[in-house]
Image (tube, rainbow, N blue to C red):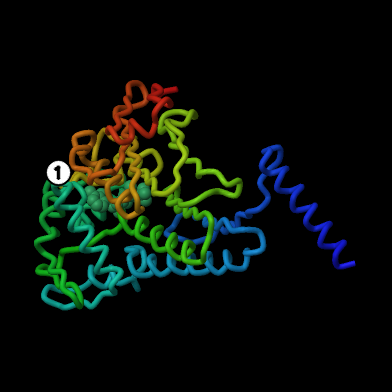
């Protein structure tokens, strides 16, 4: 009896193997375990762990850890939460030593590095300017030049001392905003948590910024589609075996004053919202790099392409609905290949 069962099992397995190698049916050996937790960084979130069938419990544990990692990063780095470490730094008086977690300390050091590398375009100390423009949006009137100058002068990296055990400010008014980088850091943490659970494929998507590795449930590379800020047709689509794609755009988040849209990205050099770059997409190995540089290029435009770290790819849309153009660096050009550059108004 046992022998017959074994024979039947072998025949069945052989049949499945033949069926799969002939490619006549879907690959059923893997399963995607998907979760969409709510309340993550004020946006949508999708976590996917692709595992061999039967290992769903491992996947669930990975997703638990990923969800927890994202909530922890939010709790440390969100300026929307009074209880966060970043809010404690922002409230602190001059010369007070504020102790911070290793996570926050590492994001601050990284942010200061990108500030230098981007020639000041990516500036996590620009919180007073962000608050000024958000208030202007709520009140519906442009800030006065004197207010812009004051906001610009009230906070800069020279007013922050990053120490091993904490942060010290030189001025009461110096304040930080990690809105351009914390999401990327959180995505990386979540990604590592899922990968540590032993998966064939991982996808972390927070508000359209993603990091992937391995394969999807069909055993294929993850498909990435880049949204067109001006039309329904995607700007680009490509397969990605491993890496991160982050987009920064002013078509979704902006401040409107007298019918004019102002970007939520501030040009720290002028104290005014950045102009002319409706959408920037950056591909990098990790999400913190892609996130920070997408914001930096939102300020610098195509001129910033030369400043990108080696191997980082970028696709920018400049102009407006009537007249826009797509600009890519060489690395991105190679990735897009035949897909080429469709007119962005299509
Ligand atoms: P999102 O992906 O949420 O749209 P981005 O990655 O585009 O965000 O970053 C925009 C956010 O970064 C702003 O909402 C603000 O919190 C912060 N920010 C704005 N201007 C700058 C800047 N020049 N440098 C660093 N951070 C900035
Ligand atoms: Mg960003």
Packing grade of label 1 (10 A; few <14, some 14-19, many >=20) is: few
Report which residue position mark 1 lands on. Answer: 270
Residue 147 in the figure: left or right of residue 264: left
Q: Nearer the viewer, residue 344 or 283?
A: 283
Q: Residue at x 26, y 55 (%)?
A: 131
Q: Residue at x 31, y 38 (%)?
A: 314
Up-down relation of residue 116 to residue 90 (above or below): above
**Label 1, ligand 1: CB separation under 8 Å:** no
Disc 1 element = loop
Up-down relation of residue 194 to residue 204 (above or below): below
Q: Nearer the viewer, residue 20 or 218?
A: 20
Q: Nearer the viewer, residue 69 or 140?
A: 69
Quick one: which residue is furthest to the front in this view?
A: 3
Up-down relation of residue 322 to residue 137 (above or below): above
Q: Quadrant of residue 34?
A: bottom right
Residue 293 in percent (x, y) is at 27, 47
Q: Residue at x 37, y 57 (%)?
A: 183
Q: Quadrant of residue 90?
A: bottom left
Marker count (numbered) = 1
Residue 171 in the figure: left or right of residue 19: left
Q: Residue at x 55, y 69 (%)?
A: 61
Residue 339 in percent (x, y) is at 43, 26
Q: Indicate the quadrant containing the N terminus: top left, top right, bottom left or bottom right.
A: bottom right
Task: Decide if residue 135 is in sight here.
Answer: no
Task: Decide if residue 240 is in sight here.
Answer: yes
Q: Quadrant of residue 181?
A: bottom left
Residue 272 in percent (x, y) is at 20, 43
Quick one: which residue is furthest to the right in this view?
A: 1
Q: Indicate the quadrant containing the C terminus: top left, top right, bottom left or bottom right.
A: top left
Residue 318 in percent (x, y) is at 29, 30
Residue 25 in the figure: left or right of residue 287: right
């Amino acid at each position: 009896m046992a022998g017959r069962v074994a024979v039947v099992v072998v025949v069945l397995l052989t049949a499945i193997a033949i069926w799969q190698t002939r490619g006549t049916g879907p690959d059923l050996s893997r399963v995607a375990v998907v979760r969409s937790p709510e309340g993550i960084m004020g946006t949508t979130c999708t976590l996917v762990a692709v595992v061999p069938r039967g290992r769903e419990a491992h996947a669930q544990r990975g997703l638990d850890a990923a969800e927890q990692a994202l909530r922890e990063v939010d709790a440390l780095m969100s300026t929307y939460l009074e209880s966060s470490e970043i809010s404690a730094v922002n409230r602190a008086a001059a010369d007070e030593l504020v102790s911070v977690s290793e996570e926050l300390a590492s994001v601050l050091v990284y942010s200061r590095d990108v500030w230098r590398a981007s020639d000041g375009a990516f500036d996590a100390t620009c919180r007073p300017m962000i608050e000024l423009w958000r208030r202007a949006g709520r009140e519906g009137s442009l800030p006065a030049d004197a207010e812009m100058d004051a906001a610009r002068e009230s906070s800069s990296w020279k007013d922050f001392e990053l120490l091993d055990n904490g942060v010290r400010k030189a001025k009461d008014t110096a304040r930080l905003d990690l809105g351009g980088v914390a999401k990327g850091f959180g995505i990386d943490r979540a990604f590592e948590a899922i990968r540590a659970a032993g998966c064939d494929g991982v996808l972390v998507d927070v508000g359209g910024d993603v990091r992937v590795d391995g394969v999807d449930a069909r055993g294929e590379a993850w498909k990435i589609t880049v949204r067109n800020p001006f039309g329904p047709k995607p700007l680009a689509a490509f397969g990605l075996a491993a890496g991160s794609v982050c987009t920064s755009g002013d078509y979704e988040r902006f401040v409107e004053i007298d019918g004019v849209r102002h970007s939520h990205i501030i040009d720290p050099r002028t104290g005014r919202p950045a102009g002319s770059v409706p959408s920037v997409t950056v591909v990098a190995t990790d999400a913190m790099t892609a996130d920070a540089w997408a914001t930096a290029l939102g300020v610098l435009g195509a001129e910033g392409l030369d400043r990108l770290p080696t191997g980082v790819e970028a696709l920018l849309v400049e102009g407006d609905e009537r007249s826009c153009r797509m600009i890519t660096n060489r690395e991105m050009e190679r990735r897009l290949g035949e897909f080429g550059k469709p007119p962005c108004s299509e």
